[in-house]
Amino acid sequence: MPELRYYEAVQRALAEEMARDERVFILGEDVGLVGGTFRATEGLMAEFGARRVRDTPIAEAAIIGVAIGAAMTGLRPVAELMTLNFGIVAMDQIINHASKASYMFGGQVNLPMVIRAAAGGGTQKGAQHSHSIESWFVNSPGIRVVIPSTPYDLKGLLKTAIRSEDPVLFIEHEMLYNSKGEVPDEEYLLPFGVADIKRPGRDVTIVAWSKMVHEALKAAESLAHEGIEAEVVDPRTLDPLDIDTILASVMRTRRAVIVEEGWRKVGVGAEIASQIHETLFYELEAPVQRVGAADVPTPYASNLEKLALPDAQRISDAVLKITL
Amino acid sequence: MAIAAADQVSMYRNMVLIRRFEEGVAEAYADGFIGGFTHLYIGQEAVATGSISALNHDDYVIGTYRVHAHALCRETPPRALMAELYGRSTGVCKGKGGSMHFFDASRYMLGGYGIVGGNLPIGVGAALSMHMQQQDRVVMNFFGDGASNQGVFHEALNMAKLWNLGVIFVCENNFYGIGTDVRTSSAFNEIHKKAQGYGIPGHVVNGMDVLAVREKCEELVKFSRQGGGPVLLEARCYRYQGHSMTDAGKYRSVAEAELWRKRDPIPRLAKSMLEQGIVDQAKLDQIQQEVNETVEDAMRFAEASPRPAPEALYEDLFVEGPLA
């Protein structure tokens, strides 16, 4: 099977959907002429023109607001927030407007729009450019949250997102853009709300998404040397969340560790751990563990940043704590 | 440019309807039928009436949280609006929106929004959508004096001009952002001139004179529709009531309020039509009587309507998937 990089999977998905549906268009900062800070929209302006690949001013709230208005009136915008960090500027439009319109207007309108955004730390970008704040959006009803870990998942999920009738926040990880993975040439779509078991195992369930899937897989490799077989479950979408697959896995392994790159307190991991406890408390061999970022703004110094963000070692430590 | 006699009568009826509707709302609020925040339009009738009547039926209107009048101008049935305020399933948004969120897809009314300035980029998005779909339908985008100090106001004006979109920004300048005088909140309070910073023509009109508003808006709508790009109209007006039903409006002097009441748009148009022989007093009385009956009927309808069924709680959040 041919291999694509993660950013190429974005390009491919966007190009296919734009060719398929005239209503799909892209807007965002540096998406056109520059081709995107992470090359994700490279070549699209040449292929589809400046009308459909629209460079915008640096005005995140209006970028999202404009996408909402366009989605309300017959188009299917894909708005790029250069990074999710800048999405904080647009929180009012995302949460108060995009996420609520369908409900508060009694279902008279729906918003077929995608907000793409790069997120994540690990490259010394400091406190304001390293966010993994998916939990903020998962907490708020009315917007789907998709967060792929591989080029294959990304392409199939992005195409589904563009075809979705609901607003979707599509979170890509900055450190994964150059990662490679197998992506078939044939068209495929992946459904929302279906987790993928990235590695089967019988002793412990590790739930992880985005870049943390790869850290979890590394941890699983090293744990295997100690005779512990970890199952790695990637939910791929956090809203809707495929809790059934997670619960079924934990039912088999009786132990669970939830891993997220975002802050640990009140994170998505807290929600998943809570749901496991509520449903499977008497089946568990040990309390569910959570691994997440230290509850501090991401520091710049490389040694401190490494300490702040979760990695394979810390995942292994959490697993060992409940398996030994 | 003379405005046809029939149009004048129609605008008169509309202003009387807005006034009587809002009086009915105040009564129903006092009687406990309506909850939450309810912002009345009494005093400002000429602005919505004169501006929206200059539009084609399939042009878009988008407004603020003071939005009852705009929906009435779009001819959403008063029954559906009153029922919405009463929180009934027969309401225009099935009772889920309330006073601040009137939306009527069938009448191209893109909603009322509770965050100051929040609608402005959404209206620009609708205009972009019309532009990209090669339609000459324009968007009338309402905001208040307070919104002109919000970030998204400037972002929206910039993008509208950058892409030369058909947006008529209508500022309902009633001189107060809740209790704060525009002179206290805005470094530069000639709001129509703020447009010039973006190369957008800015106009000012007496918002207590419905014929003046209509005439000016016909000119601006034509200009925008023919590809002239965005325009901004500042309509100077006054709300007789407080900001909302819970605000007694004590920050304004009695003398100021009395001065503005002398400029009341309804008797003004009545006097002018009587002088020109467009109507006689009997006709005006008949209109008032019919409007009274319409509003009473709306209130009876609302009170008799059922509240939303419990199942409605989870409906309309998403089109697809869980909780669809």
Image (spheres, coloured by chain):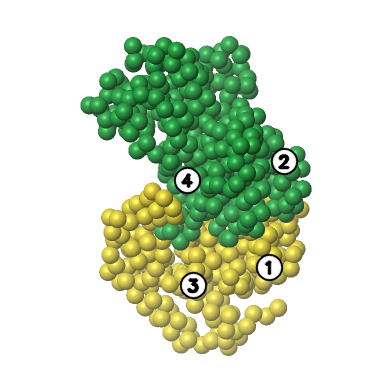
Chain colours: A green, B yellow
Looking at the rendered structure, whether the residues under marks 1 and 2 are on a common chain is answered as no
Q: Earlier in the sequence, mark 2 or mark 4?
A: 2
> Which label number is shown at residue A42?
2
- For disc 2, the chain is A
- Up the image or down, B32 lies above or below B14; here it is above
Question: Residue sitting at 41 percent across and 11 percent down?
Answer: A226
Q: CA distance from mark 2 to mark 4?
A: 26 Å
Mark 4: which secondary structure?
loop
Q: Nearer the viewer, residue B224 or A13?
A: A13
Say whether residue A294 is visible: no
Q: Are marks 1 and 3 in contact (CB under 8 Å)?
A: no
Hey, which quadrant is residue A252 in on the image?
top left
Looking at the rendered structure, whether the residues under marks 2 and 4 are on a common chain is answered as yes
**What count of labels does the image hold?**
4
> Which label number is shown at residue B136?
1
- Up the image or down, B96 lies above or below A246; here it is below
Question: Residue sitting at 58 percent across and 70 percent down?
Answer: B58
